[in-house]
C-alpha cells in the first residue's frame, strides 16, 4: 500500500503515511499562470493499492479537479485499487433537489470519483452520510469528535459540559461529554413566525454556571450559530467557553467574531487548512485505511 | 433540439440558439459564499437532444465543474443526447507527458466529459486536435479564422498582410490572407544558444512598408510573442498593425502592453469573456450543431 499526499492535504497525508509506517508518495503540484492545475507523482505506484489523501475545502473546484487528475493519473500509472480519502467532501451540502430541474451536485461529484477509478471513499463528518447509498462504491465516514474531545481534555477543563449549537449536533456533544467525563446540553433553534428571526433556546438539565463549556459542531462556516451559542453560554454564567468543530471553514474575520463573542479558543481539525486546524484526524484515517 | 446556455457562455449560448431559431434554456447559476457552484435548469429538457454551450476559460476549474454539473443534470433530467460545446477547452495545452509519472490532463478532462454523458464535443481552435483521437466520442474543432478575418475586412484595411507570430500559426495567416484578399507572412522563433533568449525573425516575400498588417494567433495569454511581433512590424514600416486571436485569455495589463507595443486594436472572439471579445463564433457553432 502507498499513500499519496495531495496538494490540499500534504501534511495530513504525510502524517497518515507515517502512522502506517510508510513514506508518502509526494505530489509535485503547481498552478499555471492562467490558473490551470498541474500534478505529477514523484515516484511509482504501479501494482500497488494507493490511498490518495486530498481534501476539497475552498477553493473547492481547484481541489476537486486536483483530486480527479491525481486519481486518474494513479490509475493510469498502474495502481491496483484507488482509495480516496477526502476529509472535507465539497458539495456534500448539495444533497437534495428542492426545486424543479435542480441537480443533486454531490451525486455528480461521487460519479466523477467513480469515473476516475476510485474504488472506495473515506470522509470525515460528511454532511449527510445518506448520500453514499447511491455512490456505487463503498464509502466510510469517520467521526472526528473523539480526537477533538481528546485534545480538549488536555486543557484542564473544570466541570466540563459539551454543548451542541443545535439538535443536529447533539450526538456529537453526547459523545464528547462521555470522553470529557462531563454533562451535555444543546440549543434548540426556532424561527420567529413574525420577524423570521432565528432564536436559540438552551436545553440542559445542568447549570453551566461557573463551569467550562465546549460548543461542538461539525462545521463552522459563517460562524453566526457558533458566535450566538458562545455569547449565550457566557451570559448564562459559563466560566470559559471553547468552540470546537471538525471542519473550520472559517475566515480570519469569522474566527475573530467567535473570539469576540466570548470564546477563549476556537479549535478545528486538519480536514481543512486554517489558522485553527490544530487537531489532526490522521489517527482516524490511518486506522480506517490500514484495516 | 435545445440549447442550454451555461453560466460561462450565456450570451454566446443565446446567440447560437437564436441563429438556429430556438429559445435558449437558461441556467440559474450562483456561487455559494463558501465557493461552491450551483446550477439549475430553468426549463425541461426531457427527451430532447441538448446542446450545452459552456466555455472553460479562467477560472477554468470553476467553469469545468459547472459544465460537469450541468451535463450530468441534463442527462439525469432525461435528455436524449448531450452535445457539449466548449469553445475554449481548458487543459488542452497539457496534452503530453514530458516527465516520469506526469499525467496528460486533457485526457482526464475528456474522460470526465464522457463520464457525465457527453456524446459529442465541439471546440474552437483547440490547442492540438490530435488529443481527440483518444476521447472515445466524436469531437469536432472549428477554426475561428473566418469570422475574425471577416470582421477585420470591415475595417477598411489598406493592402492587408496577414502575419503569423510563429510557424504554428502560419496556416491561420494563410487562410486569413485569402479572406482579406492580401498577402501573408510569418515570424520564425529561434532560441539564442548562449543567452537562452528567444528571438523572432520575419519571413515574408512582400514588404510590409506602408501596409496594414494583422497578426493572427490562436491564443493571447502572456502576450509577449504578440507584443514583440507588433513592435517589429511597426519597426519594419507597417502603416497600422492589428492584433487578432481566437482566445483572448488576456488581462487588462496584457491588452495595454500590446497596444503600447504599437497595435491600433486587439481583437478576439467570444470563446473567452474579455474586453476584446468583439467577434462572435456563434455562426460557426450554430452551423456545426444544426448539421
Image (spheres, coloured by chain):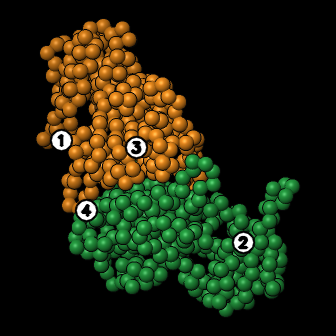
Chain colours: A orange, B green
Q: Residues within 10 Å of mark 1 (few under 14, many from 20)?
A: few
Q: Earlier in the sequence, mark 2 or mark 4?
A: 4
A174 in relation to B153, above or below: above
Residue projecting furthest to the bottom: B181
Q: Secondary structure at mark 4?
A: helix
Closer to the camera, B4 or A231? B4
Asked if the residue under mark 4 is in contact with the one under mark 2, i.e. CB atoms within 8 Å, the reply is: no
Discs 2/1, front: 2
Q: Residue at x 42, y 34 (%)?
A: A272
Q: Quadrant of the C terminus of chain B?
A: bottom left
Q: Which mark is residue A195?
A: 1
Q: Earlier in the sequence, mark 3 or mark 1?
A: 3
Q: Residues within 10 Å of mark 4 (few under 14, many from 20)?
A: some
> Which residue position holds label 2?
B166
Would residue B273 be seen by someone viewing this image from the given angle? no
Q: Which mark is residue B76?
A: 4
Give the chain of mark 1: A
Check chain identity for marks 2 and 4: say if they share one.
yes
Locate residue B127 relative to residue A13 in the image: left or right: right
Amino acid at each position: 500500500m502507498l499513500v499519496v499526499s495531495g496538494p490540499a492535504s500534504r501534511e495530513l497525508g504525510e502524517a497518515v503515511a507515517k502512522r502506517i509506517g510508510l513514506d508518502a508518495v509526494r505530489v509535485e503540484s503547481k498552478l499555471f499562470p492562467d490558473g490551470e492545475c498541474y500534478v505529477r507523482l514523484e515516484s511509482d505506484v504501479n501494482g500497488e493499492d494507493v490511498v490518495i489523501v486530498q481534501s476539497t475545502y475552498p477553493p473547492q473546484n481547484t481541489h476537486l479537479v486536483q483530486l480527479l487528475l491525481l486519481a486518474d493519473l494513479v490509475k493510469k500509472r498502474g495502481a491496483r485499487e484507488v482509495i480516496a480519502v477526502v476529509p472535507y467532501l465539497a458539495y456534500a451540502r448539495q444533497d437534495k433537489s428542492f426545486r424543479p430541474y435542480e441537480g443533486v451536485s454531490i451525486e455528480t461529484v461521487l460519479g466523477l470519483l467513480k469515473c476516475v477509478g476510485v474504488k472506495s471513499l473515506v470522509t470525515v463528518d460528511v454532511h449527510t452520510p445518506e448520500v453514499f447509498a447511491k455512490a456505487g462504491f463503498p464509502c466510510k465516514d469517520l467521526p472526528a469528535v473523539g480526537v477533538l474531545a481528546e485534545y480538549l481534555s488536555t486543557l484542564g477543563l473544570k466541570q466540563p459540559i459539551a454543548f451542541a449549537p443545535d439538535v443536529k449536533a447533539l450526538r456529537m456533544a453526547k459523545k464528547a461529554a462521555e470522553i470529557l467525563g462531563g454533562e451535555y446540553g444543546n440549543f434548540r433553534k426556532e424561527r420567529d413566525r413574525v420577524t423570521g428571526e432565528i432564536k436559540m433556546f438552551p436545553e440542559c438539565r445542568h447549570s453551566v454556571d461557573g463551569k467550562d463549556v465546549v460548543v461542538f459542531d461539525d462545521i463552522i462556516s459563517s460562524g453566526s450559530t457558533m458566535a450566538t451559542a458562545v455569547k449565550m453560554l457566557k451570559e448564562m454564567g459559563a466560566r470559559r467557553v471553547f468552540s470546537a468543530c471538525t471542519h473550520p471553514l472559517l475566515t480570519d474575520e469569522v474566527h475573530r467574531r467567535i473570539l469576540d463573542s466570548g470564546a477563549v479558543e476556537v479549535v478545528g481539525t486538519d480536514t481543512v487548512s486554517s489558522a485553527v486546524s490544530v487537531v489532526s484526524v490522521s489517527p482516524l484515517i490511518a486506522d480506517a485505511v490500514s484495516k
